[in-house]
Image (tube, rainbow, N blue to C red):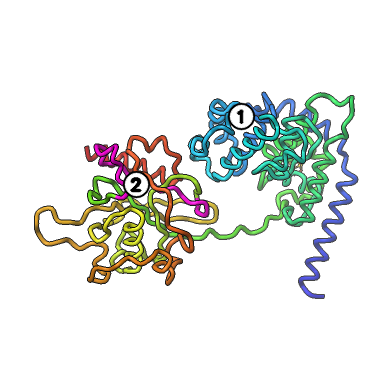
């Protein structure tokens, strides 16, 4: 028998065994024990204390990829600014992103606003009340729809997320990857079996409490690594505990290694680019320290947020700005960037050595980001012209070809590959940076610049 076949047979046998355990499980008794544990140990959250569907929905979207502790501060601020779906639907994307800044995964904020618009247009600015309508909202998946229905409306819908997945996998001693589709489907069925059928005699809030209790038990007691089985109210029903295998369940698949990436961001100040005119703000000539921001395009990381102009660098040797002199192609691309996008005659400008190197992890990338300040290289005292970034370009004046043609030979050096370079740009006064929804690295750079300018004053 081939090795592959053996693994498949073993997985099928494990699932069969777990299914039998799920059928025979003492849900009635385990449920009672769980509920009395929850009364004494359940966590208190504002979305649990006042569980309207709207508040539950906001909390559930925030809690995706974010710890409860972090979400708590954002939740209150968000709700006081947008207390109803209508107010959220009427806000601009920029306002919503501003309140979301620092939470990461910004598509969640955009989805919230889009879903609020759907609620306004189709449901009289209220959360929809059927599972199908909730599931159809932007940004809402199977877990989130179940959470809104059970926590928000106290209806019989199961939930399955990291804590309950681990808990159910252990109670069944399921020794295959619980995220694999058949195993996951089994765990959804188990999550539903924990909820008794609808009946007129059921106590109020039963489904809210049961789903909350399962989540809290998974989070507080049946924790990752070594679970606290001695404190567990359902330990006598747990198959992993009986078999002594609780620490090896759930079986986790290996995580992908993060991809290293090197970026360079530019601090471009109007004071430093006196000849730039394309983006000059005629109504604010008195603010020469304005910095140039670009809005990240929809295909980029931090889509929709503002950021300092940034390029991805292919040369892994790039450190502290020195690679500019060794990498004329990269210099060429920066020249193109400045001339076509900033309107600055690139040959005058020199991005000095990196002022600061930031490290940042986002999605699957581990980013090393160097910040360079672009400065006017023209001599002010009539002496010899200092070397600039662009000295290695052709000495003759050149006509800037069209963007796609110029990018074509090695477009991979820019993250703008195949996309038009016309992005959204703004000169922003330093004092206004705090009001802009910035990417996380953009915020770090803004803080660095503010401190640096304070020292220079
Ligand atoms: S007995 Fe241990 S492994 Fe089983 S559910 Fe409780 S905490 Fe988890």
* Number of residues whose C-alpha sits closer than 10 Å to that of mark 2, classed few (under 14), some (14–19) or many (20 or more): many
- The reply to whether residue 228 is visible in this rendering is no
In magenta stretch: residue 43: no
Q: Which residues are magenta?
A: 278-301
Kindly identify which residue carries mark 2: 292
Q: In this picture, is 341 found above or below 214?
A: below
The number of discs equals 2
Numbered badge on residue 86: 1
- Under circle 2, the secondary element is strand
Residue 6 image offset from top left, x and y in percent: 80, 69
Q: In this picture, is 17 found above or below 442?
A: below
Locate the N terminus by quadrant: bottom right
Locate the C terminus by quadrant: top left
Question: Is the residue indicated by label 2 positioned so its CB lies within 8 Å of ligand 1?
Answer: no
Q: Is residue 361 left or right of residue 392?
A: right
Are the residues at dot 1 and dot 2 in contact (C-beta closer than 8 Å)?
no
* Number of residues whose C-alpha sits closer than 10 Å to that of mark 1, classed few (under 14), some (14–19) or many (20 or more): some
Q: Dominant secondary structure of the magenta stretch?
A: loop
Q: Is residue 217 left or right of residue 73?
A: right
- The reply to whether residue 291 is visible in this rendering is yes
Q: Is residue 435 left or right of residue 342?
A: right
Q: Is residue 252 left or right of residue 10?
A: left
């Amino acid at each position: 028998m081939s090795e592959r076949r053996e693994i498949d047979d073993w997985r099928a046998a494990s699932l069969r065994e777990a299914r039998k355990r799920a059928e025979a499980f003492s849900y009635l008794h385990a449920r009672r024990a769980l509920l009395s544990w929850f009364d004494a140990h359940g966590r208190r959250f504002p979305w649990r204390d006042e569980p309207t569907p709207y508040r539950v929905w906001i909390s559930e979207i925030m809690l995706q990829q974010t710890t409860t502790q972090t979400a708590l501060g954002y939740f209150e601020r968000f709700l006081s600014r947008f207390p109803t779906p209508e107010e959220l639907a009427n806000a601009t994307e920029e306002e919503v992103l501003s309140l979301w800044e620092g939470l990461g995964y910004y598509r969640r904020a955009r989805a919230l606003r889009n879903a609020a618009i759907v609620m306004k247009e189709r449901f009289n600015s209220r959360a929809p009340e059927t599972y199908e309508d909730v599931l159809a909202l932007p940004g809402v998946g199977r877990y989130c729809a179940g959470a809104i229905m059970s926590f928000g409306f106290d209806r019989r819908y199961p939930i399955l997320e990291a804590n309950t997945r681990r808990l159910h996998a252990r109670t069944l001693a399921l020794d295959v990857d619980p995220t694999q589709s058949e195993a996951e489907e089994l765990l959804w069925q188990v999550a539903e079996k924990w909820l008794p059928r609808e009946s007129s005699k059921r106590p109020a809030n039963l489904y809210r409490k049961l789903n909350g209790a399962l989540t809290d038990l998974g989070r507080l007691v049946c924790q990752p690594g070594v679970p606290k089985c001695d404190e567990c109210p359902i330990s006598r029903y747990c198959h992993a505990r009986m078999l002594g295998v609780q620490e090896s369940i759930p079986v986790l698949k290996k995580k992908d290694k993060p991809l290293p990436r090197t970026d360079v961001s530019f601090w471009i100040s109007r004071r430093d680019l006196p000849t730039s005119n394309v983006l000059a703000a005629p109504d604010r000539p008195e603010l020469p320290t304005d910095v140039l921001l670009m809005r990240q395009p929809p295909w980029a990381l931090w889509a929709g947020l503002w950021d300092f102009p940034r390029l991805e660098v292919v040369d892994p040797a790039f450190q502290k700005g020195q690679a500019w002199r060794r990498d004329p192609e990269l210099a060429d691309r920066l020249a193109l960037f400045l001339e076509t996008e900033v309107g600055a005659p690139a040959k005058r400008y020199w991005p000095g050595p990196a002022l600061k190197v930031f490290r940042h992890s986002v999605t699957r990338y581990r980013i090393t980001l160097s910040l360079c300040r672009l400065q006017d290289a023209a001599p002010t005292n009539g002496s010899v012209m200092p070397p600039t970034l662009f000295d290695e370009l052709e000495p003759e004046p050149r006509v800037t070809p069209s963007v796609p043609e110029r990018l074509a030979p090695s477009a991979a050096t820019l993250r703008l590959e195949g996309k038009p370079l016309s992005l959204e740009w703004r000169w922003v006064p330093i004092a206004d940076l705090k009001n802009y929804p910035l990417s996380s690295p953009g915020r770090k750079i803004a803080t660095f610049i503010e401190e640096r300018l304070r020292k220079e004053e």
